[in-house]
Amino acid sequence: MTVSTAAGCAAPDQAAPLPTSLDLEKETVITGVVRDAAGTPVTGAYVRLLDSADEFTAEVVTSPAGQFRFFAAPGTWRLRALSRHGNGDTVITASRGVNEATVPVAVD
């Protein structure tokens, strides 16, 4: 399984187009936007990818447009967003191809 992570020097550009060499019949991409209570995209939120047992798998930082992206295996995943605008999570069942999700955040 290949997963984008924020560890290391810098995370990949979350707003960049998908590589043209990507075979969406073989790969699973989870992509989306973090939004605050007003529906505005949240810049700089940390989005964590948790597996079906809620174990940490990866983390990225959202783009200026609130976008995030993970390359993962098909299955059920929890997306947890942490930001200065609040926290939130959503569950997605991803299959091969592009899977889109919105993660709403609110002050606890």
Image (cartoon, rainbow, N blue to C red):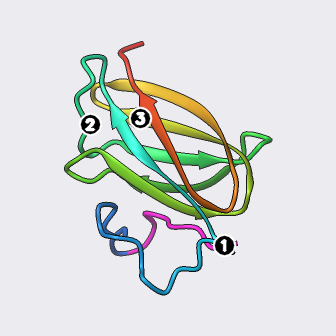
Which residue bears the numbered disc 3? 82
Amino acid at dot 2: Val
Judge from the rendering whether residue 44 lies leftward or rightward of residue 21; answer left or right: left
Q: Residue at x 41, y 35 (%)?
A: 82
Res. 87 mark: none
Task: Give the magenta-colored segment's residue range.
Answer: 1-8
Residue linked to disc 2:
42
**Left or right: where 103 falls relative to 83:** right
Question: What residue do we see at 43% from left, 26% from top?
Answer: 87
- Mark 2 neighbour density, 10 Å: few (under 14) some (14–19) many (20 or more): many
Question: SS at mark 3?
Answer: strand
Query: In this view, which residue lies farthest toward the top?
Result: 108
Mark 2 vs mark 3: give the one in front: 2
Q: Could you tell me what secondary structure mostly forms the magenta stretch? A: loop
Figure check: 70 above or below 55: below
Distance (Cα) linking label 1 and label 3 = 31 Å
Residue 53, quarter of the rendered image: top right
Mark 1 touches mark 3? (CB < 8 Å): no
Decide which of tag 2 and tag 3 comes sooner along the chain. Answer: 2
**Callout 1 secondary element:** loop
Q: Is 6 contained in the magenta span?
A: yes
Q: Please identify the quadrant where the N terminus is shown.
A: bottom right
Farthest front residue in view: 25
